[in-house]
Amino acid sequence: MWYLINNIISGDSSPAIKKFSVAIKSYSILIILKNNMYYAMNMECPHAGKSLLNGTCSEADEIVCPFHNFKFNMKNGACTNNNEGYRLKIFPTKVENNQFYIFIEA
C-alpha cells in the first residue's frame, strides 16, 4: 500500500542532503533526499539496532551508521563493508503530482 508523506517535498534546493523521519504502521522510517533522489529505509541499523538518523551519506549512495560505521547501499539495503549478512530494509518511493509516497507491504 502506498502512503502519502506530507511536508517532504519543498521548492528549496539546499542543503544537498536532507533527512526526515516518519512512523508508518510498525516502522520507523528514515527518508533521505540526496541529489534530487529519494531513499526510504528502516531507521534502525540491522547490526545493533541503533538509529541511522545521525548517520552520514557517502558519495557511493550509502548510509553510514554513526555507531559502528556499517555502510548500507541506500538503493538495495546491502551492507557494503562486511560479509556478516546484514541487510537494511528499503522501502520503494515515488513522487506523483508533487506528492511523495512510500510503499509498505500490507
Image (spheres, grey):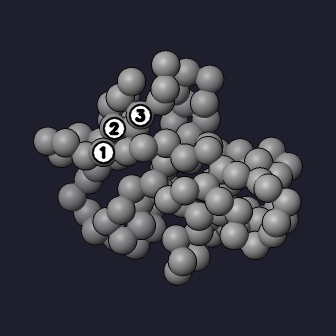
Mark 3 Cα within 10 Å, few/some/many (few <14, many 20+)?
Answer: some
Q: Nearer the viewer, residue 62 or 105?
A: 105
- Left or right: residue 29 versus residue 102 is right
Residue hosting label 3: 103
Report the residue at 35% width, 62% height from top. 37
Report x, y in % for residue 48.
Answer: 85, 49
Report x, y in % for residue 43.
Answer: 64, 45
Of callouts 2 and 1, which one flags the residue occurring earlier in the amino acid sequence? 1
Report x, y in % for residue 45.
Answer: 74, 50
Figure check: 15 above or below 52: below
Q: Identify the amino acid type marked 2.
A: Tyr
- Left or right: residue 66 versus residue 2 is right
Q: Quadrant of residue 99?
A: top left
- Left or right: residue 4 versus residue 49 is left
Q: Quadrant of residue 84?
A: bottom right
Mark 2 Cα within 10 Å, few/some/many (few <14, many 20+)?
Answer: many
The label shown at residue 76 is: none
Do the numbered discs 2 and 1 sit on residues whose CB atoms are within 8 Å?
Answer: yes
Q: Identify the amino acid type marked 1.
A: Lys
Report the residue at 82% width, 66% height from top. 83
Q: Disc count in the image?
A: 3
Q: Residue furthest left?
A: 97
Q: Identify the amino acid type marked 3.
A: Phe
Do the numbered discs 2 and 3 sit on residues whose CB atoms are within 8 Å?
Answer: yes
Of callouts 3 and 1, which one flags the residue occurring earlier in the amino acid sequence? 1
Q: Locate the N terminus by quadrant.
A: top left
Residue hosting label 2: 101
Residue hosting label 1: 94
